[in-house]
Image: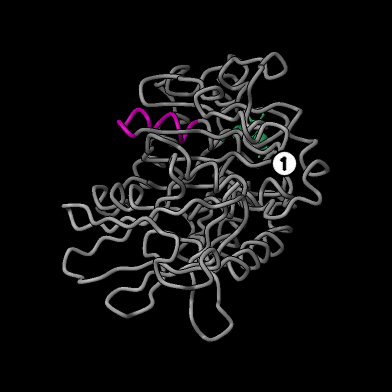
Amino acid sequence: MRTISIINQKGGCGKTTTAVNLSACLAEKKRRVLLLDLDPQGHASISFDLQPETLEHTIYDAFSPSKANSFKWDDILIELDNNFYLAPSNLLLSFLERELSDFQGKERILLGRIMELQEPFDYIIVDCPPSLGLLTVNALCATSEAIVPVEPSFFSLHGLGKLLETVRLQEEKTGHIIKVQALATIYDKRTRFSRELLREIQEHFGENLLTTTIRMSVKLKEAASFGQPITVYDRGGIAYQDYRALAAEIILQEEHPAQKHEEYSLKPQRSEEGVVFRYKNPEANRVMLAGDFNNWSPDEGVVARKRSDGVWEKVIPLDPGTYQYRFIVDGKWVPDPNNPIKADDNLGGINSVISVN
Ligand SMILES: Nc1ncnc2c1ncn2[C@@H]1O[C@H](COP(=O)(O)OP(=O)(O)O)[C@@H](O)[C@H]1O
Ligand SMILES: [Mg+2]
């Protein structure tokens, strides 16, 4: 599964347009896609002809402590098309920052929720709000990639330093690396100014500037106002061409899709008996689990079993909180290869980290 945040604290640079139309084009290419609207303005939701304020369940439910026990993905997911789902948002989301001000682990709520998704997606695309606040930080914690749409205008390069610094800080804090790529949007190649700015974006991002450029097209504005993605509204113009090319470029970066799928299924997951940790190694003689939750005593309090496909499963009931852990594979202490969230153990080693909500 690939998880991609669409981020830029600047409004109007094409985040929502990219999130919506990239998602639609990926779904058209037979990928199973979840588009997550993380902007209280609900523009991605409106782009699919929804009226956010009338929705009973939104992505707010995934964050709010008051909904912690009743939250179900099934309640909020809207099926837009075959293999294409939306988690909508509305203005309620703007209250979260205050509601969660004293909440421990508030940056990792979305990550925890994504881990609870029963059915894996090929792509989760997160449309972020125009800020670097709690919602964007949650998106960065929960995704392993980010696309930064940059519109070639005078102010567009201004905030890029701050944005990249935020991403790096987040990486340092969590030990979780985010691959950042820039995308030139609303591009008018007729102006010299645009061409010069494109060159400047390239200087910032080097090879991490996506080859595809999204050209200026009034059809994208129209499509949004009709509540349709470009795949439905107009398949004859440059807007469709460009977003299809972007989807193709993103798909080309996929590595061994089958392997990715397996990685996802091996991530820690919540079950009725507790959290299930999994480590695949058919050759190992003994795999144990140790962490904060059992005072680092290997397999203490753990229900252990080895599956016939060589996956060692460790189940332990956990109260809400954030825990560090490692597997012990034939005596060697190793972090969880299928969990991207890691932390320095202050002794020169790396632990894996899990948040339970
Ligand atoms: N390639 C494009 N050509 C023309 N207009 C665009 C293009 N991309 C986005 N827009 C328009 O620009 C405005 C801002 O885009 P939007 O995706 O909502 O930005 P953000 O989510 O970053 O605030 C919208 O009216 C949108 O329709
Ligand atoms: Mg937007």
Q: Is residue 129 magenta?
A: no
15 or 93: nearer the viewer: 93
Cβ of disc 1 within 8 Å of ligand 1? Answer: yes
Colouring scheme applied when the structure was drawn: one colour
Ligand 2 lies in quarter: top right
Place of residue 321 in the rendered image (x, y in percent of width and height, measured from the top left): 62, 55
238 or 103: nearer the viewer: 103
Residue under numbered circle 1: 11
| Residue 122 vertical position relative to residue 147 in the rendered view, above or below | above
The majority secondary structure of the magenta stretch comes to: helix
Q: Which residue is rendered at x = 39% and y = 56% of the image?
A: 277
Place of residue 26 in the rendered image (x, y in percent of width and height, measured from the top left): 38, 34
Q: Is residue 234 left or right of residue 6?
A: left
Q: Which residue is rendered at x = 62% and y = 33% of the image?
A: 69
Q: Say which element carries label 1.
A: loop
The residue under label 1 is which amino acid type? Gly
Place of residue 126 in the rendered image (x, y in percent of width and height, measured from the top left): 55, 40
Question: Mark 1, residues whose alpha carbon is within 10 Å: few (<14), some, or many (≥20)?
Answer: few
Place of residue 297 in the rendered image (x, y in percent of width and height, measured from the top left): 46, 73
Task: Please report the bounds of the magenta region as a residue range.
Answer: 21-31
